[in-house]
Amino acid sequence: MESELAHNLSTSESVWKSIQQVLKEYINIRSFNTWFAPLELVNLDAQYLELRVPNRFFCEWIDNHYAKIFNNAIVQVLGEHRKIKYHIKNHNLPDSPYMDADLQPSSVNHRTNFPQATINSPFYTRINERYTFNNFIVGDGNNFAYAAARAVASSPGRTNYNPLIIYGGTGLGKTHLIQAIGNFALAKYPLTKVYYTSSETFTSHFINSIQQNRISEFSAYYRSCDILLLDDIHFFSNKGKTQEEFFHTFNDLHQNGKQIVLTSDRPINELVALEERLISRFKWGLIVDVQPPDFETRLAILRKKCDESDLDIPGDVLEYLAANLVENVRELEGALTKIMAQVTFTAAEPTLELARQIVNEIARPDKKILTIEHIVEYTAKIFHLSPDHLRAKTRKKDIVRARQVAMYLAKHLTNYSLITIGLHFGGRDHSTVIHSINTIEKLLKQDVNLRHQIESMKKHLEFQK
Ligand code: ADP
Ligand code: MG
């Protein structure tokens, strides 16, 4: 009975993680960190999703601003609706939004050994304790990266691997490894100041501190760490000012023997929009790559995840998943979570047939390639225009907006280059395409209606693939 309870709880946790993952795709990371990261799962059953929130303000804010998105995310993961029930964590807290909620997630385990000043800083981002070396499966594609990460974690700042740069495609374990370094170092040297942040958050912290005249605080914070873990530095491309600031931080830390670890989804040489001097600094250290896992590693990863969740899935089902989901580990995990959810909540059996269905949903091997033409036609229809309007030179406001939306969708739903996209819109050049995409990205942050519209367009187009 007890183990059944534990089993359900860990399954619920992974379902909740998947819901959060879906939410992240639909709302910007800052809002996500503010409103959703601090929520803690209390219970999930056939009727309710119960969450612990830091105070009353959270429930109201989420209900008023994110109800639809939240419900959609639940349905997307579970295949059906759940009512949301909130438990308020601390009745004594003022019901005020003016807190660094995104920076002090309540779910953080306040480790006594973690310098309090760090957690209270407006720049603090938590490390996920789930990412450890112990639950990282090592195979041919990642053993070098793993070894380097362990070496750095054991002797931060004292190896030649400074900076250590891990690069590789998405979903291959870069974030897992970089955070495992932090967790390992903290366990070994509890007083180490380990700062983890994504380059996107670093950039937004930087921009906010310029706006709020807190730039010296920002610099001092990032320079006060012993280990700086900066995820996804490809995000710095084209962000000149942030690069500049990072360059100084980097030099300062490096000179003082502090450890720097970076990840990137591209080889460093291909980060064309990064300044030459940054790239040459990066080459002082060690650059390692992570490659997609081979079949055995994929299977081992699945087995490990099943063990962790106390889940009993037949070998042939796992093998089927490992044989068919070959691109990345995130996909593999996603499939397993879906199976878990079905087994737990609909009493389905974890059969090969179920695995087949799920693989089809994820991989759709026979999917059609979505063309830019199709996106143009569909967008024109939604905006009550003709496709030729979008291709023509006209600058009428409505047409411009529709054209920008179509370009944005083409960028996000296809692999075509900006130049090719421009060609499909009456031969516009790629800087116009970039401008359009940026405009929509900015608008998406402010305009809920537009966000919903684009989301539903995306879903429609994805579905047609
Ligand atoms: P990336 O940052 O490279 O896009 P992540 O580190 O976020 O990828 O990995 C995606 C998911 O796959 C994470 O949940 C991670 O724990 C898991 N994962 C990736 N590689 C491994 C591995 N070798 N062993 C166990 N889990 C892995
Ligand atoms: Mg990552």
Image: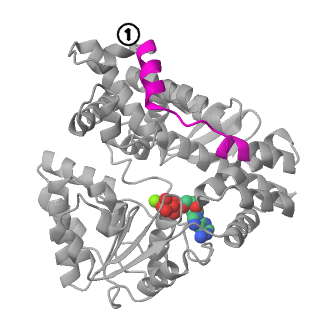
Instruction: Tell me if 370 is positioned left or right of 255 in this view.
Output: right
Q: Residue at x 29, y 59 (%)?
A: 121
Q: Is residue 435 above or below residue 377?
A: below
Indicate if the residue with disc 1 has its beta carbon within 8 Å of ligand 1. no
Q: Give how far across and how far down residue 323 sits, in percent.
A: 74, 60
Q: Give how far across and how far down residue 89 sits, in percent.
A: 53, 45
Instruction: Tell me if 430 is positioned left or right of 311 in this view.
Output: left
In the image, 227 versus 193, the foreground residue is 227
User: Does the image show residue 223?
Assistant: no
Q: Give how far across and how far down residue 122 sits, in percent.
A: 28, 55
Q: Find residue 436 and report its image quarter.
A: top left
Q: Say which amino acid is labelled 1.
A: Leu
Magenta segment includes 88: no
Instruction: Tell me if 351 is positioned left or right of 365 in this view.
Output: right
Q: How many numbered markers are drawn?
A: 1
Q: Main secondary structure of the magenta part?
A: helix
- Magenta residues span 359-381
Instruction: Tell me if 349 is positioned left or right of 27 in this view.
Output: right
Magenta segment includes 363: yes
User: Does the image show residue 268?
Assistant: yes
Q: Residue at x 45, y 83 (%)?
A: 148
In the image, 182 versus 355, the foreground residue is 355
Q: Is residue 22 above or below residue 226?
A: above
Q: Is residue 457 above or below residue 229?
A: above
Q: Residue at x 55, y 80 (%)?
A: 143
Which residue is tagged 1?
A: 385
In the image, 389 versus 91, the foreground residue is 389
Q: Residues within 10 Å of mark 1 (few under 14, many from 20)?
A: some
Which type of secondary structure does the marked residue at label 1 adopt?
Answer: loop
Q: Is residue 82 above or below residue 7?
A: above
Q: Tell me the quadrant of the picture where the C terminus can be found.
A: top right
Q: Residue at x 35, y 67 (%)?
A: 116
